[in-house]
Amino acid sequence: MEKIGGKMSEYHVPVMLKECIEALAIEPSGTYVDVTFGGGGHSKEILKHLGEAGVLVAFDQDVDAQENTIKDDRFVFVDQNFKYLKNNLRAHDLIPVNGILADLGVSSHQFDVPERGFSTRFDADLDMRMDQSSQLTAKHVINTYSEEDLHKIFGIYGEIQNAKSLAKAVVTARLTQSIATIADLKSAIAKLIPKGKENKYLAQVFQALRIEVNQEMEALKEFLLQTVDVLASGGRLVVMSYHSLEDRLVKNFMAKGKFSGTVEKDFFGNEIKPFDLVVKKSITASEDEIKINNRARSARLRIAVKR
C-alpha cells in the first residue's frame, strides 16, 4: 500500500504501466486525460512526465477513488463517469487534449470491499454499482428482469454457455423468495455451476451483472465517440480492456471509427475514419508481469492516433 493524497490506497498495481505511458507519447506541455483514475497509479506516472505547463484531468465516479486525488496544481479531478468526457473538458476549457488513457478493468480494491457486492468471495447484498447514487443494482436485475433479458445478459456480457438454463433457474428461484444476497444467488444457480470450474463460472455471472448494472457497454461507446471531438490532431487514444466484448468495440472503433460494418470511403475511395492505428494488433503483458500480477493475463492494450 502507498499513500496518495494523504489516503491509504489499496488499489491494484496498474497493468502495463510502462507500455501505457509510452503509448501516450507525452509532451511535457500537453493536456492529458486519465478517464479511469482508480487508485491514481497511471495518473501519478503521467504527472512525472509533464512540465509546469502540462495538465492532467482524471475521471472517476467511484466515491472511494475520490479519496486518492493528487495534490498537484496541474491535476484536475472530475467525479463523473467517462461518458461525460466532452462536457466536462469543455467546462474546464481544456479541448483539445493531446492524449486519453482508459484502463477498463475493475479495480481489485472494489472486489476487496465486501459490501460493494462485486466479489464472489464474500456474502453481501447484490449491489455492484460503481456509482453509489445510481438506482440500478444487481438485486434489481436478478429479481425483476425477464427470463429473456437475463438470458441475453448472461450470454452476451458473461459469455456463459448455459445462459438460457441459468436465466430459467434464476426466474424459478425468485418465485419462492427474493434473491437478495450473493449467497442467495449462488444457492439459486448451484446446480448449473460446472464442477471444478466454480470460480470461473461465478466470475462470468458476476461480470455479466456488473456490466448491466453499470451500463458499461453503452458508456464505453459514448466515451469512444467523444474522443474524436476532444483529441487534437496527432493526439493519442490508449485503451486497455480485459474481456473480448470491450476489446472488440475498441478494436472496431479505432480501425473504422464505428462499432460494426465496414469503413466508409469518399468519392475517390479514400477511407473516412478518425484514427490511424499505431500498432495493428493489441499489446499484451509480458510473462514476467503476469507472474507478478495475474490481472495482466487478460489485458489487451490498443493505441490509435487522431488524424
Image (cartoon, rainbow, N blue to C red):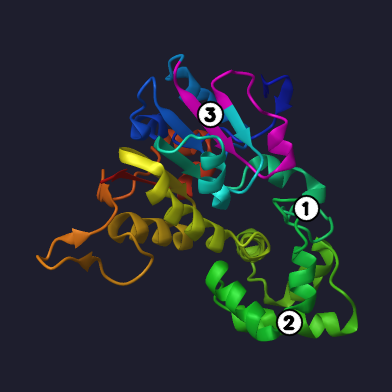
Residue 70 lies in the magenta stretch:
yes
Task: Residue 95 in the image: state x and y as whole percent.
Answer: 44, 38
268 over 76 or under it: above or below: below
Task: Residue 2 in the image: state x and y as whole percent.
Answer: 66, 21
Q: CA distance from mark 2 to mark 1?
A: 30 Å
Q: Nearer the viewer, residue 215 or 111?
A: 215
Task: Residue 182 in the image: state x and y as whole percent.
Answer: 80, 62
What residue would you read off at disc 1?
A: 133
In the picture, measured across the screen, residue 190 lies left or right of residue 253, that is right
Q: CA distance from mark 3 to mark 1?
A: 25 Å
Q: Earlier in the sequence, mark 3 or mark 2?
A: 3
The kind of residue tagged 1 is Ser
10 Å neighbourhood of mark 3: few (<14), some, or many (≥20)? many
Q: Residue at x 35, y 64 (%)?
A: 258
What residue would you read off at disc 3?
A: 43
What residue would you read off at disc 2?
A: 169
Q: Residue at x 44, y 18 (%)?
A: 53
The kind of residue tagged 2 is Ala
In the picture, measured across the screen, residue 65 lies left or right of residue 300, that is right
The kind of residue tagged 3 is Ser
Task: Say which element carries label 3.
Answer: helix
159 over 39 or under it: above or below: below
